[in-house]
Structure formats: structure tokens, C-alpha cells
Amino acid sequence: MNKLLSFIFLVFSAFLFSQNYAVSAIPENLLHKANAVVRNDETTIDINAIDNMVQTYNKTITILNKSGENFSSIRIPYDKSVSVSNIKVSILDQNGKVIKKYSKSDFIDASHSPSFSFYDDSRILFLNYMSISYPYSIQYSYTTETRNTVFMPDFFPIDGYNISTEKTSLAINNKSGIRLRTKVHEADFAKISFTENGQKYFYSFSNVPAVEDEPRSPSLIDFLPKAEFSLDQFSLEGKKGNLTQWNEFGNWYYQNLINPVSEITPALQAEVAALNLTGSTHDKVKKLFQYMQSKTRYVLVAIGIGGWKPMLVEDVRKKGYGDCKALTNYMRTLLQAAGIKSYYCIITDDRSPIKFSEDFPKMFGNHAILMVPTEKGNIWLENTSQEIAFNHLNYTSLDRNVMAISENEIKLINTPTYKPEESSEILNAAVQLNPDNSINVDAKFRFSGAQYDFQMPLTSLNKDEVKEALKERFYYLNMENLEANNVTNNRDEALINYEVKLQAKNYSKKLGNDIILRVMPFLDLMQTTSHEDRKLPLEVYFSYQDTYNFSLEIPEGYKLAEVPKSVQLNSEFGSYSLQFSMENGKLVTQRKITILKNIYPKEKFKEYIEFRKKTNNLDNTKILLTKI
């Protein structure tokens, strides 16, 4: 079997350079909805020792049209622990003939960081080839060598949306003597072929059609098949550790990444003492958190052990900035100085919940937050925002587990999940109809939970910018005037409030002596395209509840021809109610919609759209006012 696997590796290496890359050779099914096609993608990983891993990449990709240009860039990240060599690039015409070649000297070498990064020792080599005609192909290869073996790449069938795969493979040669744990996740989307024997592993996908990004679909990682890997022992910047159990890994993480940068200096201890913390643990944590917010701001800092080691706490204290790691650990150290235990938490921040596996310890994640256990439950702190409320997480951090690290242990702990009523929009509006068919509206809005997150940007805008943002939100109204007042961010209770006064033209229509108008000026209309050939599951990313209350003053000389009938809709996706009543000469409308978080099979999408079509139609309810 070992000889067979060795033969397979040799065959695939030779195959890359002998294959026919003419565009005409691409199977028809791989062109459907594709802007690019991966013709062959071959990766070989040689694990030579606990602190030596060599990865060789060979890839050929055909760019079919201008929309596929985002797949044409070659980007090779590296840093002081990763060396790059043997870079070769060829451009092929539509017949598969080489028309241009590039080498490493043609690449741009730049900092691999946003402009707001203060410190970053990561770099990137990149080459952007732009063609004036399509289709064409790019063939490239390179080798990286690193001393860091804690990060093993997952193996997926496709690179993104609207790109198909003719063939992709991963070969792993483990010469280190260390056990390599593997986990294969099957899925209907594509069939993964794999052979594992001794310390040689081979995985492949072939003939994988392109998938289109469809409305309300999960992250790709949620429904693709994949293979993932992790070594039992690893090295990270010369620090060796064990990754067979979460607890053992947590101890290594704390001792090597957290503790060395977390000295409680006399100056820091004095700052905490000066706050005169009193009351419950909840009260103390809140005061410290808001103190931290007032002292710091977020910048990217990607230095240290693989970009995972926070800045020195004392540097954060003096300079007043840090990234998610640094600010989270600074907050943790402030709490420690106050005698309060907390957990430094690694999390994957994404619209779909991506979770750590209980039975497959590995190092991943893209964000750090803090958890403080108290007698009344866990407090969760997002430390990168000066404006975010206490004990509030963005919806992209909810309903998933975190790798929670403290001095003596590591836990996989679940973040909160909002009930619909905890993620709400509440609107109370008085509507006055004018003789010229315009309306005046006096409205008050309140947002909580995930809807608080979406409104937070308003709180950092000036008055004119808020006005323009709300005009965009209410684009469907023909507005003459709009005033936005009292925009407030309640950071104690995670509530955002604002008031709106507006006048909208041509809102009602005359029908002889009568008037017809929509009963609710503010709408929550959503696109309801059904996508009959939908391929992806449906995901509702968070539960929410919207409650709208309208009071419409009936103009003098008119009466309501008929009070609309109240309606109640119920489905597995949520519920909708619309109630009407006459109170003191005013039509009072109460509208409530509740939508439930879930992932549904693609077959349910049509039912979901039908439900939302009904809610859209009801939101458009019109009334007739007759002349007395």
C-alpha cells in the first residue's frame, strides 16, 4: 500500500504539467454558473519534524470572464517563520499554450495588514495579472517552509462561489513520528475520496460544479465536505506543546501566550485601586469594562507568536490601543488585579455559527472575547469597541462555543442565544394625513439584541449623516423633510433609541371624493425571489421580533369605510399578527412579526418565501377614507 501511495503522488506531480489545459477540454457541467474553473490544484505537505513542515502548491485555474478576475490574484502570505521559494507562474491562452511567464522578482512584497495596523510582521507576495481578453489560464507553483506545525490547513472542494473544480488533491507525508489526527466530514455537495495508510494520506475531489451565492444561505464552510487535521504534538515559534486534549492545550496556551504578557504592574494595580470598586461582581466588572473602553481603541497588532500572542498589558495601558487579543487580555488583567476571575476566549466570528469540536482539539479561530463567571450567570465582553454595550456580543459571536482559557483549565463554553423578543425593533408612530396627500409622521424607534448591532453605526455619525442614513433606510417614502433627534446608545442595557419627524409627499391618492392610502408608512419588505432551482440550505442568522404601533388620525370630514380585519399567521419560520381598532377617532394598527433562527433544507426555501410574501402583502394593507 505504501508503494501504491508513493506511486499516486508521483503520478499526480507529473499530471499537473502534462494535462491539456485548453478551455475546450473543460466539461460542460463545470461551466454552469462558473466565472472560473480550477483545472488542477495539488498540495503536498511534508511534516518532517515537530518544528518543520514543507508545503508545495501547484495550481492551474481558468478565468472565464471579467467576474472571475478575483480568482486570478496570486497571494502568498509569509512572515519571519515562513520562507517562500520556487515561485513559478505561467499564463496560458484559451488553447492551453504558454504566452507569458513570471518569477518571484515580478511579485510585489508588501505588509499583509490593513492601513490601521500599528505593528505587523506578516508579509504577502502578490501578483495581479489582468487580461484584456477571456478566457485564459494561470498556472503557478511555489513552496513554503515553516517551523510552526500547529496550523494544519483544512481541505475543501472549492475556493468560493461561482468557481468549479475539475480536480483538487492533498497529499500528506508525515515523517515526524508524531501522530496526525484526521477527521473527514462527508456531505452531499461533493464526494471526497481519501486513502490513509501509515503516515501517508491522500485526499481528492473531482468534477465539482460551481455554486452560486444564494440569498440567506449559510457560510460555505457549513455545508461543504472537508477534511481537517491536527498533530498530537506541535511547535509554534519554538514553543512546543501537546494538542491531544483541550485541557492540556489550554494550559500550554495560557503559560506560553497569555501569562508572559500579563504582569500586573504597580501602575496598573494603582489604576484599579483608584476606581474604588464596590457592590456586586456584576457592578465591578461593568465599571472596569467601561473604564477600559474609555482608555483604549482598537488597532490591528499582528506580532508575537504566530500573531496569536497579545501585546504586553503594560504597553496597552501606556499606549491606549491594541487588537482583540491585546484588549481582551488587558481587560482580563484588570479584572485579575481586582480579584475577579475571567476566561480569555477564542472564537470564530462569522454570520454562521462555527464551533470547536469536543473530540477533535485543534487551533483555529479569528477573534478574542472575554467571559466572566458570576453568581448570576456569565458576563460576556466584546473589548474592541468603545461604544458597544456592557455584556453584549455582536450577533456574529452568538450561539456557538468558544475556547475559554484560564490559568488552570480550558473549557468549551457556549455563547448566549437571543430569544426573538431580546432582538427587537419597537416602533411607535403617529401619522397625520394632510389635504395635499402628504403625511406627517412622528416616530420613536428602539432596538435591542442583534438589531442593536445594525444600528450602532448611527451613534457615531453627526446629525446630518444620521439624516442621510435614515433617508436611505426609508427610501420608499417620497420625503420632503426629515429630522432625526435624540439618537442614544444605552450602553447599560444594549438599547439604541432615536426619534424621527418626517413629511412624505404623494402618500395618499384621491378617488373622486374619497382617499386611499397604505395604513403603515414604514415597511419591512424583503426580496421574495423563489429561486426554483435553489441549491443551498436556508439560514435565518438570528431570531428577532419587530413590533410596530401606528396611530392614524382620520381627517375631519372623512370616515373609515371599513376597519380592516385582524390577521394572524403562524409557520415554522415564525409568526405575524396585524390588529386594527378605532380609538378616539384614530385608526390604531399593531403589527408584530417574529422570525426564528434556524438552518432549513433547501426544499423549505419556497415555503419561507411564500410566508414572507404573505407578510409583505399584509404590510401593504390599504384603507379607504370616504367623504362624509
Image (tube, rainbow, N blue to C red):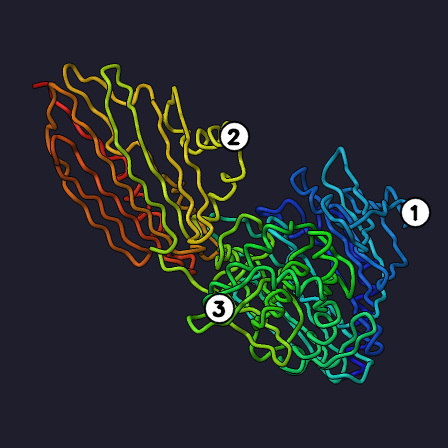
- In this rendering, the answer to whether 357 lies above or below 389 is below
Mark closer to the chain start, 1 or 3? 1
- The residue that appears at 18% across and 46% down in the rendered structure is 567
Q: Residues within 10 Å of mark 2 (few under 14, many from 20)?
A: few
Does 346 sit left or right of 253 as displayed?
left
Determine the residue positioned at 73% across, 43% down: 115
| Mark 1 touches mark 3? (CB < 8 Å) | no
Q: CA distance from mark 1 to mark 3?
A: 58 Å
Q: Quadrant of residue 326?
A: bottom right
Q: Secondary structure at mark 2?
A: helix
State which quadrant residue 616 falls in: top left
Residue 383 found in image quarter: bottom right
Ranked by sequence position, the earlier of labels 1 and 2 is 1
Residue 385 x, y percent position in the rendering? 58, 51
Q: Which label lies toward us, 1 or 3?
A: 3
Q: Which residue is mark 3?
A: 281
Point out residue 384 in the picture as x, y percentages from the top left corner: 60, 53
Callout in the foreground (1, 2): 2
Cα distance in 3D space between marks 1 and 2: 46 Å
Foreground mark, 2 or 3? Answer: 3
Decide: is 5 above or below 300: below
Mark 3 crowd level (few <14, some 14–19, many ≥20, 10 Å Cα)? some
Q: Amino acid at mark 1?
A: Ser
Under circle 3, the secondary element is helix
**Rendered-image quadrant of the N terminus:** bottom right
Q: Which mark is residue 105?
A: 1
Q: Which residue is mark 2?
A: 465
Q: Residue furthest right?
A: 105
